[in-house]
Amino acid sequence: MVQANCCKRLHHHSCDYAVKPE
């Protein structure tokens, strides 16, 4: 099960599925 990681670090809520946040 893949959960979307929503990072509020960016200018907007960017949910990355396969890409890992820096």
Image: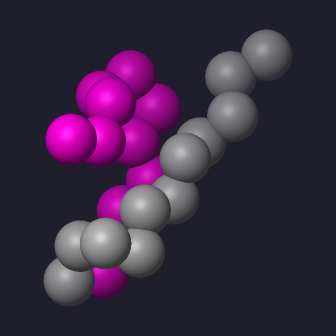
Q: Does residue 4 appear left or right of residue 15 in this picture?
A: right
- Please state, as top left, top right, bottom left or bottom right, where the N terminus lies in the image: top right
Q: Does residue 4 appear left or right of residue 21 in this picture?
A: right
Residue at the top extreme?
A: 1
Q: How many marks?
A: 0
Task: Tell me the magenta residue range.
Answer: 12-22
Write the residue at 38% across / 22% down: 18
Where residue 19 sits in the image (x, y, percent)? 30, 28
Q: Does residue 2 appear left or right of residue 20 in this picture?
A: right
Where residue 17 sits in the image (x, y, percent)? 46, 32
- Among the 4 quarters of the image, the one containing residue 21: top left
Where residue 15 sits in the image (x, y, percent)? 45, 53
Where residue 14 sits in the image (x, y, percent)? 36, 62
- Residue 15, relative to residue 12: is it above or below? above
Q: Is residue 3 magenta?
A: no
Front residue of this view, candidates 22 and 3: 22
- Residue 22, relative to residue 17: is it above or below? below
Residue at the front extreme?
A: 22
Judging from the image, the colouring scheme is one colour
- Please state, as top left, top right, bottom left or bottom right, where the C terminus lies in the image: top left
Name the dominant secondary structure of the magenta segment.
loop
Residue at the right extreme?
A: 1
Write the residue at 69% across / 34% down: 3
- Residue 15, relative to residue 16: is it above or below? below
Write the residue at 59% across / 42% down: 4
- Residue 22, relative to residue 8: is it above or below? above
Q: Does residue 4 appear left or right of residue 3 in this picture?
A: left
